[in-house]
Image: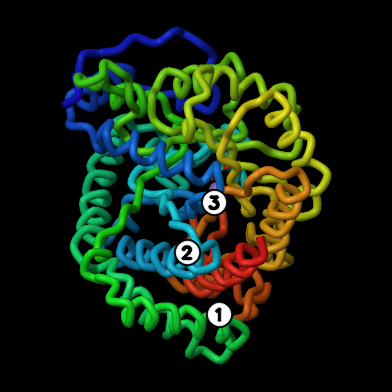
């Protein structure tokens, strides 16, 4: 059990926080949050930390994936099922490629807040507060919708709770059975556009039959773990959900198993880095191309002073063109300092651009190239490429260009549904898993 006693926090500068117009409503909401049950438990977070430590040593591979921005409206049973299905399908392929377990982590059940490059958005003559994610305000372009509303903190909690409940049911209740997952992947290969991956799919098929012939107990493998993660951005949500584990006396974020700090809020002396340095969960920090290696080493020392295996994941997001120049000094800096982190590649956030048709998009081929660069850099330095972090959906959206289905500029308008960054659709996600599995095989 965890204690709900209020915790106090130092008053440090915090970037990207909403300006709540109604302080009383904010106090009411944070007070309510502080007595609600934890969404995740200390013991679960500790297990995930061990899994991530395995990935840091090359004994497992991490797959993090999900929406850029979850929304309340899209938290439907079908959407959640299809996202979990996509993650499980990718994980099956990656497990084969890596010949190690795959640690499955959703950007799910809490990914409701977004950092913005500008505080306001202007359309025509009208300027309103920027959309900061459903945790804070609504996407609709009216003053009422864009006003930060603290009741949303509670709605985010309840939506996360319902989402997590379904994730747990799907992954513990037999839906994640490897035999089903394998059948779903046959559907992907049946599409002639994916003929390139037939050989590996055939090999996986043989491996499944081999396992069956050896008498592997598939019934034993019907349960899997899918962990919940999100960016710890809005501290008025994270702090009230931070609890002391009464068994160990340690402090945990209970909003998700794994939380990370984004590229825009990872100031060494800011409130966000202070926050993650005070919780026991496994945590991540995003690292972009302009990061100074010495600063990353300082961050790692601050967040993980005791060098606990699996505690810190550095999620690098460099861009396909930049990774060969930008990643090596950072990896070298960290390993020369004797720090052990889990290296994860986010091939999405360094590869965003505006399409000729005016959509924020990414090219599948750039995403693949960044992952390839990530493997090459780590091989050259003798460090371990520990996993990937991607924005994806289980739906057939048209938000990212390319892939075997050749999504083109003019297709983007067909099903462009994201409220924030473009996501790989179901097909592109599986295709990425096959391509990365090939890279893992030659690792
Ligand atoms: C994100 O993960 O959606 C994000 C905003 O990433 P970053 O902090 O790396 O820009
Ligand atoms: Mn994003």
Q: Label 1 vs label 2: CA separation?
A: 12 Å
Which residue has dot 1 on it?
Answer: 200
**Residue drawn 74% across and 66% down?**
356
Task: State which tag comes first along the sequence, 2 or 3.
Answer: 2
User: Who is closer to the viewer here, 158 or 223?
Assistant: 223
The mark lying in front, picked from 2 and 3, is 2
Between 424 and 46, the one lying in front of the other is 46
Q: Assess disc 2: are there few (<14), some (14-19) or many (≥20) residues with their C-alpha within 10 Å of its C-alpha.
A: many
Q: Is mark 3 within 8 Å of ligand 1?
A: yes
Question: How far apart, in angstroms, are the residues tagged by discs 1 and 3?
Answer: 22 Å
Q: Which residue is label 2 attached to?
A: 95
Q: Is residue 29 visible?
A: yes
Determine if residue 120 is in view: no
Q: Secondary structure at mark 3?
A: strand
Callout 3: few (<14), some (14-19), or many (20+) C-alpha neighbours within 10 Å? many
The quarter of the image that holds ligand 1 is: top right
Q: Depth check: give the residue in front, 237 or 148.
A: 237
Q: Residue at x 31, y 53 (%)?
A: 225
Image quarter of residue 404:
bottom right
Bin the neighbour count of mark 1 within 10 Å (Cα to Cα): few under 14, some 14-19, many 20 and up: some
Position of residue 250 measured from the top left corner of the image (x, y, whole percent)? 31, 18
Please report the residue visible at 57 percent of the width from the left and 48 percent of the height from the top: 386
Determine which of the numbered discs, if any, sits on residue 389 in the image: 3
Which of the 4 quarters of the picture holds residue 84? bottom left
Query: Of helix, strand and loop, which one carries label 2?
Result: helix
Across and down, in percent, residue 65 comes to: 47, 54
């Amino acid at each position: 059990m965890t204690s709900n006693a209020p915790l106090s926090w130092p008053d440090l500068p915090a970037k990207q926080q909403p300006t709540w117009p109604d302080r009383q409503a904010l106090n009411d909401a944070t007070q309510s949050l502080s007595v609600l049950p934890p969404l995740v438990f200390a013991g679960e977070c500790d297990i995930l930390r061990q899994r991530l430590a395995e990935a840091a040593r090359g004994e497992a591979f991490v797959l993090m994936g999900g929406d850029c921005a979850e929304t309340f409206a899209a938290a439907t049973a079908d959407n959640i099922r299809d996202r979990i299905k996509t993650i499980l399908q990718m994980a099956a392929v990656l497990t084969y490629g890596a010949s190690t377990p795959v640690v499955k982590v959703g950007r799910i059940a809490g990914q409701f807040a977004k950092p913005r490059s500008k505080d306001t958005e202007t359309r025509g003559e009208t300027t309103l507060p920027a959309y900061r994610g459903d945790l804070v305000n609504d996407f609709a372009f009216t003053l009422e919708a864009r006003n930060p509303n603290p009741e949303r903190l509670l709605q985010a909690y309840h939506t996360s709770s319902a989402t997590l409940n379904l994730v747990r049911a799907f992954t513990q209740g037999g839906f994640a059975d490897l035999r089903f997952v394998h059948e779903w992947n046959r559907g992907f290969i049946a599409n002639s556009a994916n003929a390139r991956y037939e050989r590996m799919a055939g090999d996986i098929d043989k491996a499944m039959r081999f396992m069956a012939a050896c008498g592997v107990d598939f019934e034993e493998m019907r349960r899997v773990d899918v962990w919940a993660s999100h960016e710890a951005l809005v501290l008025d949500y994270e702090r009230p959900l931070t609890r002391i584990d009464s068994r160990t006396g340690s402090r945990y974020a209970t909003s998700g198993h794994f939380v990370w700090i984004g590229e825009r809020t990872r100031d060494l002396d800011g409130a966000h880095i202070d926050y993650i340095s005070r919780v026991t969960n496994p945590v991540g920090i995003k690292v972009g191309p302009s990061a100074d290696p010495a600063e990353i080493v300082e961050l790692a020392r601050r967040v993980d002073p005791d060098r606990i295996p699996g505690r810190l994941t550095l999620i690098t997001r460099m861009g396909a063109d930049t990774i060969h120049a930008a990643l090596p000094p950072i990896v070298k800096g960290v390993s020369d300092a004797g720090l052990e982190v889990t290296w994860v590649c986010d091939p999405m956030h360094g590869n965003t651009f505006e399409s000729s048709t005016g959509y924020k998009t990414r090219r599948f081929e750039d995403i693949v190239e960044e992952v390839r660069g990530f493997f090459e850099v780590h091989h050259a330095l003798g460090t371990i490429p520990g996993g990937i972090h991607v924005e994806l959906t289980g739906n057939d959206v048209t938000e990212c260009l390319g892939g075997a289905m050749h999504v083109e500029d003019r297709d983007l308008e067909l099903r462009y549904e994201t409220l924030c960054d473009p996501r790989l659709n179901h097909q592109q996600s599986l295709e990425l898993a096959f391509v990365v599995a090939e890279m893992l095989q030659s690792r």
